[in-house]
Image (cartoon, rainbow, N blue to C red):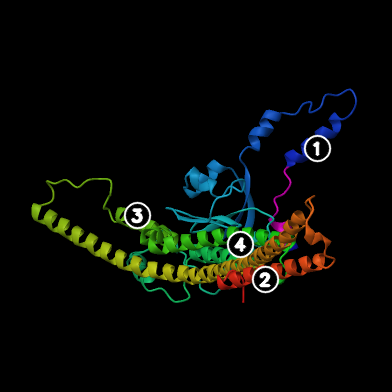
Amino acid sequence: MADLKERLLPLKPQSAINLRGTTSQASAPGRQPFQGLDLSGLKKRGQGLRSWIRVDTSGNSQVIEVDKFTMMRRCDLPARDLRLLDPLFVYPSTILGREKAIVVNLEQIRCIITADEVLLLNSLDSYVLQYVVELQRRLTSGVGEVWQPEGPELNRRSCRNFDNVFGSPSPDYLPFEFRALEVALESACTFLDSQAAELEVEAYPLLDELTSKISTLNLERVRRLKSRLVALTRRVQKVRDEIEQLMDDDGDMAEMYLSEKKSRMECDQSMMGFRSNDGLSVSAPVSPVSSPPESRRLEKSLSMARSRHESTKSSESATESIEELEMLLEAYFVLIDSTLNKLTSLKEYIDDTEDFINIQLDNVRNQLIQFELLLTTATFVVAIFGVVTGIFGMNFAIPFFDDPGAFKWVLIITGVCGIIIFCAFVWFFKYRRLMPL
């Protein structure tokens, strides 16, 4: 991995070395800083350049520096598609099929896939380097040969058998763009699944600890865990929706057959060149006087029949090819759907834990209310003693005060009445089911 990182890192430009030498000279006393350095030209030269990792169909990789407009002309992409790959902005996962390229933005993998190469934003992220290594390994392993045209001068037989080649591909056959897309999907799905597994390992013990001991620290940890779960679920859901939307749209899947479209274009060009070599000039129109009307009608009917036949064959081959891409996407749709099911199960477990905690808190709250009710009843009973004390504390003469055993009888009668009143309240609470039996 270290050798690959050193090989993929871009070389230090000579302008940076010259700039360092100029700044060191400018630090000398009596000299102006950046003297003799054309800063405007330096800004123009470095404006918009980005480092890209290019991987071709043979598995060879190199680092190139290309600006945005050159990349737009090279891949025939609009500016809004390149903004999806900008690392300075955060965009949701997207897979776009264009005329000459496939724009892939899946987690850390941000690349442009064409029929001949993969252009990947140069990054020191380990998943990006693993993507490059895995793509090189699959391209150089020899499993499933990548179809390449023999050249611009294809004969008639190769052009006629073109639909048969793509109409009935072998099970191990995958074009270059689909192999690169498969590695990107596998990398993104594996990354999200690993994050979901790490979250599961961390979540279940924490939730079990929270059910046994409810504390502020455990509640805070669960809150952070739930925030991470919601963010990860949103990312997984976006990848799943993107794959599902791509599977539902046959037109988008047909646009992703870049090798087929390129080969058909080269086949048409070769047929045009073959006709021009036979003396049938495409640009020179045929005089209507030189050809009889019957021959022109026959030629017109034959061309219409040929076009209908070719359109029928192309539609049938496109349907079979779309099924091949649909099977590829369906495999990773099942994988990302299983990851989403894991996160959904974890969220349900968290919700069940929250419900259990709320039930426990409600039980404690009910116990406190019951205790408060008993305490209020006891306070009412004690207040009776205060009433009796206030009555006997009046400053007037009563013959009952002269009896030496009167105080004892007052305490006994007041205590018995208080106990009877307290028991009556408790019985009433139990009768009304305000307290457990």
- Quick one: label 4 or label 2, which is nearer the N terminus? 4
**Are there few (<14), some (14-19), or many (20+) residues within 10 Å of tag 2?**
few
Q: Distance between the residues labelled 3 and 2?
A: 116 Å
Residue 341 to residue 237: above or below = below
Instruction: Nearest to the eye among marks 4 and 1: give it.
Output: 4
Instruction: Please name the residue that numbered disc 3 is placed on.
Output: 273
What residue is shown with label 1?
20
For disc 3, the neighbor class at 10 Å (few under 14, some 14 to 19, many from 20) is some
Q: In this view, does 424 lie above or below 63?
A: below
Q: Can residue 417 be seen in this view?
A: yes
**At x 9% / y 56%, what residue is drawn?**
294
Q: How far apart are marks 1 and 2 (CA)?
A: 98 Å
Residue sitting at x 24%, y 64%: 309
Q: Which amino acid does label 2 sit on?
A: Ile
Query: Which quadrant is the C terminus positioned in?
Result: bottom right
Quote the CA–CA distance across marks 4 and 1: 47 Å
Crowding near pointer 4: few (<14 within 10 Å), some, many (20+)?
many
Which residue is label 4 attached to?
229
Q: Which of marks 1 and 2 is nearer the N terminus?
A: 1
**Label 2 secondary element:** helix
Local SS, label 3: helix
| Start-end of magenta stretch | 3-13
Q: Within the magenta stretch, is there residue 87?
A: no
**Mark 4 / mark 3, whichever is N-terminal:** 4
Measured Cα–Cα span from mark 4 to mark 3: 60 Å
Measuring from the top left, give residue 275's x and y in whole percent: 30, 56
Comparing labels 3 and 2, the label whose residue is closer to the camera: 2
